[in-house]
Structure formats: C-alpha cells, structure tokens
C-alpha cells in the first residue's frame, strides 16, 4: 500500500475510535439520567394528585 494512504487510513481509524467512545459515553450518561428521573418520579408519586 502507498504510505500516504496508510497514514490517512490510520488517522481516520483513530477518529472513528474516538467518535465511538464519545457516543458510548453520551449514551450511558443519557441512560443514567433517564433512570434517575424515573426513580425520582416513582418516589414522589404519592405527592402528585391526578
């Protein structure tokens, strides 16, 4: 393979890896926030009048 192409592929691969890690962290953070909000709503359901 051409050395220039190999270097470009290496950079793109590292960028894809970094983006994947960011997406995983953002997804986990969103899931945790949703769980905490749901638990808070269930804990205070007796305070709400419908």
Image: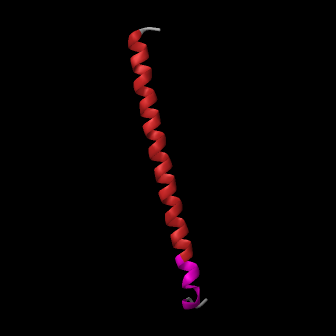
Instruction: Please say if 4 is above or below 28.
Output: above
Task: Examine the structure image and report whether residue 9 is included in the region drawn in magenta.
Answer: no
Q: Is residue 31 left or right of residue 22?
A: right
Number of numbered discs overlaid on the protein picture: 0
Q: Residue furthest top?
A: 2
Q: What's the image's color scheme?
A: secondary structure
**For residue 47, which quarter of the picture?**
bottom right
Q: Position of residue 3 (x, y in %)?
A: 40, 10
Residue drawn at point x = 42 percent, y = 31 percent:
14
Q: Main secondary structure of the magenta part?
A: helix
Using the image, determine if residue 49 lies above or below residue 5.
below
Q: Position of residue 22 (x, y in %)?
A: 44, 45
The quadrant the C terminus occupies is: bottom right
Residue depicted at x 58% and y 85%: 45
Placement of 47 over or under 35, stated as above or below:
below
The residue lying at 43 percent from left, 38 percent from top is 18
Query: In terms of depth relative to the viewer, which is nearer, 14 or 49?
Result: 14
x, y percent for residue 16 = 46, 34
Q: Which residue is at 55% across, 68% downward?
A: 35
Question: Residue 6: where, in percent of width, then height?
Answer: 43, 16
Q: Name which quarter of the figure residue 8 lies in.
A: top left
49, 40: nearer the viewer: 40
Image side of residue 42 versus residue 4, left or right = right
Magenta region includes residue 45: yes
Q: From which residue to which does the magenta span run?
A: 40-47
């Amino acid at each position: 393979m051409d050395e220039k192409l190999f270097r470009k592929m290496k950079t793109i691969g590292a960028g894809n890896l970094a983006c994947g890690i960011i997406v995983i962290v953002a997804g986990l953070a969103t899931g945790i926030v949703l769980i905490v909000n749901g638990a808070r709503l269930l804990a205070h359901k007796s305070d709400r009048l419908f």
